[in-house]
Amino acid sequence: MSPKNNNIKDFFKALPKNIFSGFVVSLIALPLGLGLAMASDAPPIAGIIAAIVGGIVVSLLGGSHVTIAGPGNGLVGVLLVAISTLGLENAYVAIIFSGILLMGLGFFRMGTLADFFPSSAIQGMLAAIGLIILGKQFHIMLAHKIQREDTVDYLFEIPFSINDAIHYENKGLIYAALAGVISLAIMLFYSKIRNKYLQLIPAPMWIVILSIGFSYYFELGLHQLNPISKEYMISGIPSIQNIIADIPNPNFKNIWSLPFWGSVLALTLISSIESLLSIKAVDKLDSEKRRSNVNKDLKALGLATIGSGFLGGLNVVTVIARSSVNVNNGASNRSSNFFHAIFLVLFIVLFSTQLARIPLPALMAILVYTGYKLASPSVITKIFSIGKEQLIIFFVTLIVTLKIGLITGIIAGVITTLVIHVIINKSLGLFLRNVLKPNVLMFKETSDENNFYVSVKHFCSFLNYYRLKQQLDAVPETEDVIVDFSMCEFVDHTVMENMHSYQELFNKRGGHFDVIGLDMHDTDSKHPFALRRMLPVPKIIKNNLTRRQTSMEVLAEDYQFNYSPKKEKEVSFLNNFQFFRTKHINHIYNKLSHKSSAICLFDIEFSEGEFIAKEVVRSTMLHIELDYNIPEFTLDREGFLEKVSAFAGFKDIDIENHDDFSDRFYLLGDNKIEISKFFNDDVTHFFESNRYYHVESNGNALLIFGKERLAGLKEIKTLFDFGKRLKGVITQNTYN
Amino acid sequence: MSLKPFKSIGIGVAYSPNLKANLFEAARLAVFFQSKLVLIHVGESSKDKITMLKDILKSFEKDNLDYDVVFKTGNPVDVILSTTQKKRIDLLILGAVQRERFLKYYVGSIARKITREAKCSVLLLIKPSVERIPCEHIVVNGLKDPKTEQTIKAAFYVATKLSSEKITIVEEIKQDQISVKVDDDKSLRRANIIKERIRLRENARIKEIISHIPETYTENKTIKLQPIFGKKGYSIGHYAQIMRADLLVMNAPLKMTFWDRLFPHDIEHILTELPTDVLILQ
């Protein structure tokens, strides 16, 4: 291990980057915090308090590295119920108690809790939460406040609200509804526009900036009052003095009632599940490939929730959308979480009066979008593609959650899953007999390969997945693992999904994770669901090719290349590139390759971020394999963004005597001396006199692409030509 | 080490379709180990029964098989247990079904009841056959236990007599021996260092035991050591099944109570789902 002072040095070196990403995250956390708190019927500042306390406590005591803590969207449903049945005062007490329970989970090492729920049931629960958020906030977004008893009624009222909104005559309401609709449009189309200057500020912050600007325009520019009706403006953003004066006095008198403990349990359950799922997802994005200490994080989250409850804030959970933004902006350690909290404090101290200029519908549009993302049709189609029975589980959980409550909903989901498993296997005995048996064996094969062999017997479902997980977690991700299900009569979707994510994790970190022994299951057709689907097997070719595809086929014939439109999921050769460190590659397709040459061109689909910050990007890339080693580097056009991020710790390497090149290009890499040597006259002249491309080397291969969208046919040809000539120049240089 | 641990071999005889296969297996072993074979039948003696046994064992006459038949009425478990004691049987052979039904487990089949109470070594056969299936791979436990040294020696003796080529000694290491719980990268690294240390220590211990065994028994055999971190008594059965071992040799368990059967551990795991033929040594 490296000596301690070295760590401190590294920490300070990475600090500017972390402050930067903390700042970007705080831009999202501010509107989301306000919105989530209002959606839960709590005062808007409660969400900000949760984010501040969470950011500070979890960054100091937590066990994860690049996660962000704050108020979570999953909790809105539960908090809503808690506040409406218990009242705000007692709800804070419930939050404090759920914090204590959450800490208990951490101390009793219950970080595996989330594994005991079938994944379709969790999906169903999240979708229900999404619908609760969407249903309630949609009306406010259209400036049409309504009060209904049942959460389902809110959903059915949506068409009437739209109808009312179209026929508004009150100017204040029209402007309010317009603010909501425009904000929703910003959320929807933000990710479609790939402009770096636009993307510098996250979509929710654009909404805040635009609406504050709008309000100032009317006040200072037109000397009029803000046209948006007063009741649809955020009310009661207190100044920092008021926040301190208003710290609630918790009253522990009313804690001995059933609804109180029901709320405490629901809060604990949902916050632990949401946090655990988020931590797991963020670990996959971490560029330094670290493993989070889940139990330590739970303890810190619990403590933060207790603190937040005492100060009048909401539950603190690990949040996926903000964490993924954090990773994308170059965060490398917990300090970014800390700084996100500090920036929030600054916002509240400096701008609390400006925040009152945000119209409520605009803020609710962000939440409507969040809710939509949780319950979007693509979730349903994904689940349907895994199996019809998963859809049943999903909808049972969804409907019961909406109709009765969260805890009942998730229990119903678990029971439905069990019943479906029994029906599919036509055997209850299989489960009853074997559920308590230690069915997992793992050993390190002593032969020359030295890999880990894991064998699972009887059945493997969400009921006993924790045993398999326990064994797999004891293997470093850089090793080779073989999981054998051949003695396993039944493997469920939850397990298959987890195997898939282990596969991804191991691939990213240089290990290997193989799942074997499932072929027999298919032929037996005893339980084919999700088995075949979750494994990365290429999909069957669709016969109807698009025009672009047919022309690519023609092009391939001209150049005597092979063309295959198939989706390929085996993309491990791309994992070593810096560009994909924090991105998730979905698949490559439309591949043009040649038998003898090492050049191949393909369309690629990858995603950045998670959840509401998720952006799916398609692009065309060229991959050149070299049979010699070159230094690792990244080369891109010099621009405003790079100049900004240069302040945040990225360093541009200047090549001597080539000022033009250094001015126009932005060159990154660790090994400065080798890179300077590599970029000699020929190579720099080549780059100076050709088109701009993003060029990246991982040591023995080059990745070249132009824009973050699919290339047209002509562009494909130019890209091809560029790649070929570049390879020629580099090869010539290396051998001279 | 006693060069001949099995002086007499006993087998329960029931007139079932499996009779011939069971008898053939027992007789073959008696020939291999040069021991006396005692056939125990619970029930009245009759001429037909004796001639039938004689017919079956006729083919072993050329191997000088020495056998004896005992007829006794009563409770099968009691009869077999008392006869083994009276006749000083060292090894009792029992045919077993591979898996019982859920309910029967608590009652315990005759074979399993005998296994739990027998004072001598017991061999459980899962699929007896008339044709000899060569025993190529023997898996034996290497638990840290005073009985283990004797067990490993006996396993080598059996392997020599049955001319098995491969012996794997499985050291089961309980999870709680690893003092570090895996939480993050640091604890994972520490846990793996500790595991490696335990692995080396266990291998050294087993190698020491093997060095005490006369070379005539160890030569020309592939000996493999396999440490496994997992549930005691369970992992070895699962391992034997994966490796398609032909015989699993285990220490006899300590005295068992009703609770041990309700919450299975150690050898009970193997008895509930026999992975292969199992030899339990006293």
Image: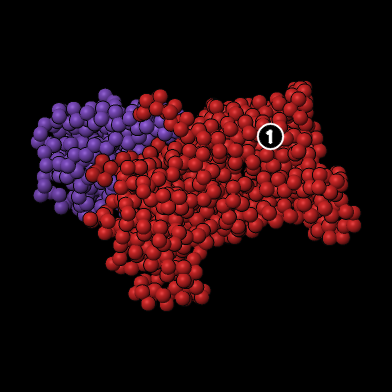
Chain colours: A red, B purple
Q: Where is residue A332 shown, x and y percent of the image?
A: 49, 37
The answer to whether A75 appears left or right of A231 in the picture is left
Count of numbered circles in the view: 1
Residue located at (59% from left, 60% from top): A381
Residue A225, percent across and down? Answer: 86, 45
**Quadrant of the rendering where the N terminus of chain A is positioned:** top left
Chain under callout 1: A
**Residue ID at (42%, 34%):** B185
Q: Quarter holding the C terminus of chain A?
A: bottom left
Q: Does A59 sit left or right of A449 as displayed? A: right
Q: Give the image location of residue B250, x and y in percent.
A: 29, 35
Please determine whether, in this image, residue A435 is positioned above or below residue B254. below
Query: Which residue is drawn at the image coordinates 35% and 42% (left, top)?
Result: A672
User: Badge 1: how crowded within 10 Å, few (<14), some, or many (20+)?
Assistant: some
Q: Which residue in the rendered view is the most extreme toward the right?
A: A169
Residue A389, quarter of the rendered image: bottom right
Taking depth in this image into account, of B197 and A436 the one nearest to the observer is: B197
- Compared across the picture, whether A615 is left or right of B75 comes to right
Disc 1 on helix, strand or loop? helix
A99 and A68: which one is in front? A68
The residue labelled by disc 1 is: A347
Percent x, y for residue A404?
73, 45
Q: Is residue A328 visible?
A: yes
Q: Is residue A527 visible?
A: no
Q: Amino acid at mark 1?
A: Phe
